[in-house]
Image (cartoon, rainbow, N blue to C red):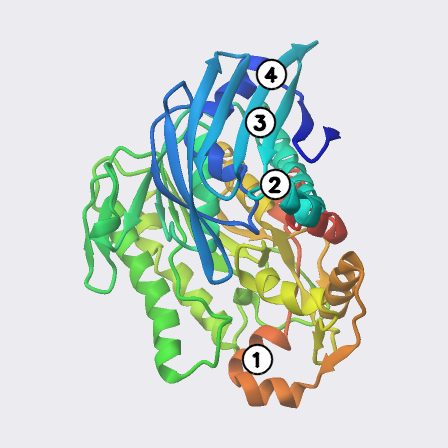
Amino acid sequence: MVKNYSHNVFEHETRVQADISTVFEWHEREGALFRLSPPWEKVSLIRRDEGIEVGAKCDIRLKTGPFSMVWKAEHIGYEKNSFFKDRQNKGPFAKWEHSHHFEETNGTTTIRDHVEYRLPLHPVSTAVAGNFVLTKLEKMFRYRENVCRNDIEFYKEYNPAPKTIVVSGSSGVVGSALIPFLQTQGHKVIRLLRDKSKLCIGDVCWNPNAGIIEDKFENANAVIHLTGEPIGEGKWTDEKKREIIDSRVRSTALLANTLAKMKNPPKTLICASAIGYYGARGDEIITEDEKAGSHDFIAKVCKKWEEAAKPALDKGIRVIFLRIGVVLTPAGGALQRMHTPFSMGLGPVFGSGKQYLSWVTMDDVLYSVGHILEHEEISGAVNLTSPNAVTSEQFSDTLADYMRKPRFINIPPYVIMKMYGQMGREVLLSGANVYPEKLIKSGFRFRYPDLMQAFGHLLGG
């Protein structure tokens, strides 16, 4: 809830159903900075001191289009369970001081954000761009409010014991969002990385193509495997198809075999898969009991992908196959690609638009992973989609309505086939109405089951 703002001060209030120590501790954990960074802002960490006490510094890189800049911040005020304050030492503003005040009443904690800022070349810049900056701040803090409240209330509901969790694909769209979430839930994350130059203390180096892995995580609690060559970009040449298959099957087999050889392996392996497992299925409602498609390339890839985990299953490890739908986030994937044309009133419908698009927000991907980690009775295939799939036409119309733009372009199938070939047929012109039966029956609550509501959160509406 926005309380007050002017061209020099911005204030925002967030109420969380949790005690003050839980809320304050969440903000102190590694990962909080990136959980609170809107996904439409491209933010990467350069360096960071541990904690938020006075003197701790953080350098991040902000990128907008072809331009990037470094934001250097320092914490200049701190009182446990009450207050902390950070200041921009270098960045886009002439002045930026952000105070975070915490107060608890009857089990509800109120966070009051108070920002004092000044644009470069004030007052001319304020007259020209002041309203634009205020709009961006409003969007950012609405997003922060939703994430902060949902994450902390999720933590309070599940009360997870701290775990050590190994994550592959940490630089991907899902992995880069999952790691900060796990960290703010109190878990320790070990990243599986191919590039030795990016290793931090505790990370593990591996090379699935060469069959090499440093198995330094025997006592970890869980492994979350997200590695895989993107499937929805460009034509599927023979080489691209090999990369799609090999990146999934080889990496999964290497992990499963490594875990099977351990004396004390992690008890849980969560392995990414995709709803492409089911193939094109029209408007039939698909649950986890359905068999794999037999004709589509993606279905065959997903079947091989899941079969590669057999050594871990034989070892007695709990294995979950996340059959993930179209993940919505402006940080990457379908929504990122759609945002610009739809914002210009040029959003298309592919083919007839009657094919189903089974979608899910990034936030619900993260919460479902947290839910599965805490529910040991869940195993096998898990559909990770919103319970409210829509047709491609409904999706496009809803996004156009959200952006208050017209939507009148239909791209005929022959154009899509000419441009993308088999990828266009299987990804853009086909679909399946996939329902997350296991998650629903296990008590999982989707935070964003409605598409318009999802756009409002993800795009800062």
Q: Residue at 48% of width from left, 76% of height from top? A: 297
Secondary element type, mark 1: helix
Which one is closest to the eye, mark 3 or mark 4?
4
Crowding around mark 1 (Cα neighbors within 10 Å: few <14, some 14 to 19, many 20+) is: many
Asked if disc 2 and disc 3 are in contact, CB closer than 8 Å, the reply is: no
Looking at the picture, tell me which residue is in the foreground, 308 or 369.
369
* Res 338 → quadrant: bottom right
- Quadrant placement of the N terminus: top right
Amino acid identity at mark 3: Ile
- Numbered mark located on residue 152 in the image: 3
Residue position for label 1: 424
Q: Is residue 5 above or below residue 282?
A: above
Please say whether residue 49 is visible from this viewpoint: yes
Q: Earlier in the sequence, mark 2 or mark 4?
A: 4
Amino acid identity at mark 4: Phe
Crowding around mark 3 (Cα neighbors within 10 Å: few <14, some 14 to 19, many 20+) is: many
